[in-house]
Image (cartoon, rainbow, N blue to C red):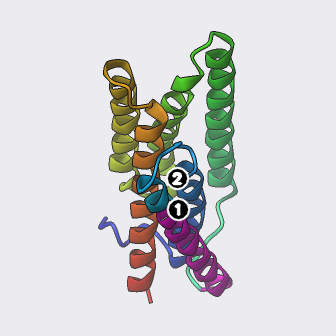
Amino acid sequence: MSELEFQSRRQAGLAALYLGVFATIWFSVPAAEQPLRALLVVASGAALVTAVIGAVVVARSRGAGGVTHDPAADRRYLLIVLAEFAAAGLGAVVLALVGWSEFIPVLVGAVVGLHFFPLVPVLRDPLLWPLGVAVCAVAVAGLVTALVSAVPAGLVVGTGTGLLLLAYAVQALLRAARKR
């Protein structure tokens, strides 16, 4: 199955919408000085535009032929996302309680990266594998950077994860455009 056969225009639009929104959120994590702060604001704006375009693709794809609804896949998706939010939220609370709140972005980034793996069969999107690996690698890079330098983990994880999610959202839009 080629990478273009498994995903409908609507699914690609949803991916751009969701990941564009989450990229915007990740770009707001780092506390950065200028000029990086300005670049993060521009990247956040680009991610928001990508999300809006994704929403337009979704709206225009409603009722399109060939899209089947799978309630079982919807349930699996919901369970995976709920588990992700629970693990990230609980982990963040624990890190804050033990005084390691600077590592919350590392934990959340790792959980976000890991949640892409069980989503591969649910969304039938093998490109989520490399996205998951890359987001996990950014989380590890943020941890290592914070441990060996004065650079905050949130700067590395927020910027890196935001860029990865934005890149994936843009390529989802490109896949949607090819589906015309």
For the N terminus, give its image quadrant. bottom left
Side of 147 relative to 111 (left or right): left
Q: CA distance from mark 1 to mark 2?
A: 7 Å
Name the amino acid type tagged 1. Answer: Val
Name the amino acid type tagged 2. Answer: Phe
In the rendered structure, find residue 27 and report the number of the disc placed on it: 2
From the viewer's perspective, is residue 79 above or below residue 90?
Answer: below
Is residue 135 shown in magenta?
no
Residue 82: image location, x then y, percent: 69, 38
Answer few, some or many: residues within 10 Å of disc 2's Cα (few below 14, many 20 plus, some between 14 and 19).
many
From the viewer's perspective, is residue 162 above or below residue 87?
Answer: below
The outermost residue toward the top is 98
Q: Name the image quarter holding residue 89.
A: top right
Main SS of the magenta part reads: helix
In the rendered structure, find residue 41 and report the number of the disc placed on it: 1
Q: Residue, x 61% and y 17% (percent of image)?
A: 95
Q: Is residue 11 visible?
A: no
Q: Nearer the viewer, residue 138 or 56?
A: 138
Q: Nearer the viewer, residue 105 or 4?
A: 105
Q: Is residue 14 visible?
A: yes
Is residue 51 shown in magenta?
yes
For the C terminus, give its image quadrant. bottom left
Q: Are marks 1 and 2 in contact (CB under 8 Å)?
A: yes
Q: Residue, x 68% and y 85% (percent of image)?
A: 63
Side of 8 relative to 151 (left or right): right
Residue 52: image location, x then y, percent: 61, 76
Residue stretch in magenta: 42-64
Q: Nearer the viewer, residue 127 or 92?
A: 92
Q: Residue, x 66% and y 18% (percent of image)?
A: 96
From the viewer's perspective, is residue 80 above or below residue 103?
Answer: below
